[in-house]
Image: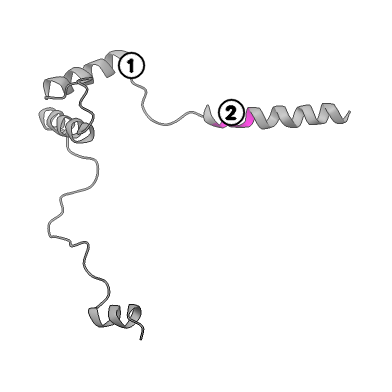
């Protein structure tokens, strides 16, 4: 009886990740033809699939996607236009505080 319970527990532990992975997502499903059409659009916009140059991959595909989006008249879904500027990398601690923290007598 114990071996049956152990077998059920082990089987449940092995099946649980598979069941959770197989859940449906709300993302739209693309057909093979749609994916190929998108690749053709990207190639026409200047992106070369499989050219062996992986050093600038993200920048190349993003630039091609931006060209395709402007050709299709689509706008970005990541919010509106932002005006202004921002600064990063500024010193968070004054020179006097830095000296007081790290220059011990």
Magenta segment, prevailing SS (helix, strand or loop) = helix
Q: Residue furthest right?
A: 1
Q: Residue at x 19, y 36 (%)?
A: 59
Of residues 100 and 58, which is closer to you in this image?
A: 100
In depth, the one of 96 and 74 nearer the eye is: 96
Q: Nearer the viewer, residue 50 or 32?
A: 50
Residue with the mark numbered 2:
19
Per the image, label 2 sits on a secondary structure element best described as helix
Residue extent of the magenta highlight = 15-20
Q: In this figure, which colouring scheme has been used for the structure?
A: one colour
Q: Is residue 67 magenta?
A: no
In this view, the residue farthest toward the bottom is 105
Quadrant location of the N terminus in the rendered image: top right
Question: Which residue is found at the position 17% from the left and 21% from the top?
Answer: 48
* Residue 85 position (above or below residue 3): below
- The residue at which mark 1 appears reads as 31
């Amino acid at each position: 009886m114990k071996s049956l319970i152990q077998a059920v527990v082990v089987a449940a532990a092995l099946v649980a990740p598979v069941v959770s992975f197989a859940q449906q997502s709300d993302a739209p499903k693309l057909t093979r033809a749609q994916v190929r059409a998108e690749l053709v659009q990207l190639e026409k916009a200047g992106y070369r699939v499989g050219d062996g140059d992986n050093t600038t991959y993200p920048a190349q595909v993003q630039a091609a996607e931006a060209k395709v989006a402007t050709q299709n008249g689509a706008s970005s879904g990541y919010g509106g236009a932002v005006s202004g500027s921002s600064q990063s990398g500024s010193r968070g601690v004054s020179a006097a505080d830095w000296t007081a923290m790290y220059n011990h007598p």
